[in-house]
Amino acid sequence: MSTLLAASLATLVFCAPGYPGGAGDAQPLVDQFANAAATASGWPAGSLSAVYDPTEEGGLAKLAQADAVLTFVPYPFYVQHASQLHLTPLVQADVADVGPQQRWTLVAKSGRITGPASMSGYTILSSAGYAPDFVRHSALDGWALPADVKIESTGQVLSALRKAAAGEPVAVLLDQSQAAALPSLPFAAELKALTQSAELPVALVAVVDSRVPAARARAMQNGLLKMNHDSGGADSLGPLRLRGFVPLKLPSRTAP
């Protein structure tokens, strides 16, 4: 297969489980981003396409395709699937109103939980619930959950918080934006923050299964880091709620 043909088959897979938005709505935005990223990286025009999937299952199916050479994923997805997909991270996303790092906060009904052991029989609901390894070993590192705690994914965080406030055996793991909105809820006084994570990456761009030659991967890394300094690149970042990209700052346990 020629280099030109191989380049034409390169796809960047955006996968954002746990967050709102349909593939149709996002497609024009990720198309624009892929074109700008290729230009910033010195890749041939038209050599990088993009596809968006809002589900874990759909994202995994797309990443299994041979043309899926890069992926843009939330950090929980990376923790859960990096080993399986042989992901090599290039850069971290600098997300508008959050930054490149964030803390996750576990909340539950006030007065119900005195420590990890008292969560026996509870269910943790979270937009990151599809990634139990992330929940247990990254977001709640140092908060040793009992073995019978269930971890479930939800896109209805407000409903989950209502359940917790009503006294159901539920705790809710919130990302930084969700936690910042918590005090505005009418039932906020019924909830208590139990523990908070260290600062963790928000999202990453990674190479999938070494499908990009090292030189081209470095070019993409350098191109992404400078996108916010170029008008075409900057125009593609805003619609995706990105300020740009920054060098990697991964926790040691997830560094490749």
Image (cartoon, rainbow, N blue to C red):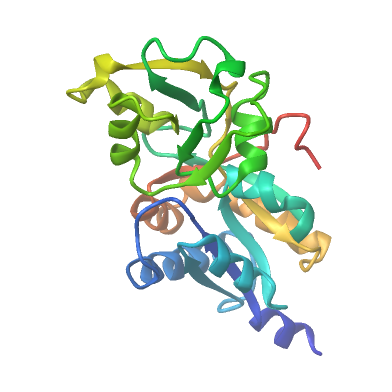
* In the rendered image, the vertical position of residue 108 relative to residue 44, given as above or below: above
Question: In this image, 139 relative to 243: left or right?
Answer: right
The residue under the point 49% across, 39% down is: 94
Residue 86 found in image quarter: bottom right
* In the rendered image, the vertical position of residue 153 relative to residue 107, given as above or below: below
Q: Quadrant of the C terminus?
A: top right
Residue 229 visible, this orientation: no
Residue 232 found in image quarter: bottom left
Question: In this image, 42 relative to 244: left or right?
Answer: right
Q: Nearer the viewer, residue 227 or 177?
A: 177
The residue under the point 78% across, 37% down is: 255
The residue under the point 61% across, 77% down is: 47
* In the rendered image, the vertical position of residue 55 relative to residue 47, given as above or below: above
The residue under the point 49% across, 55% down is: 17
Q: Nearer the viewer, residue 84 or 1?
A: 84
Q: How many marks?
A: 0
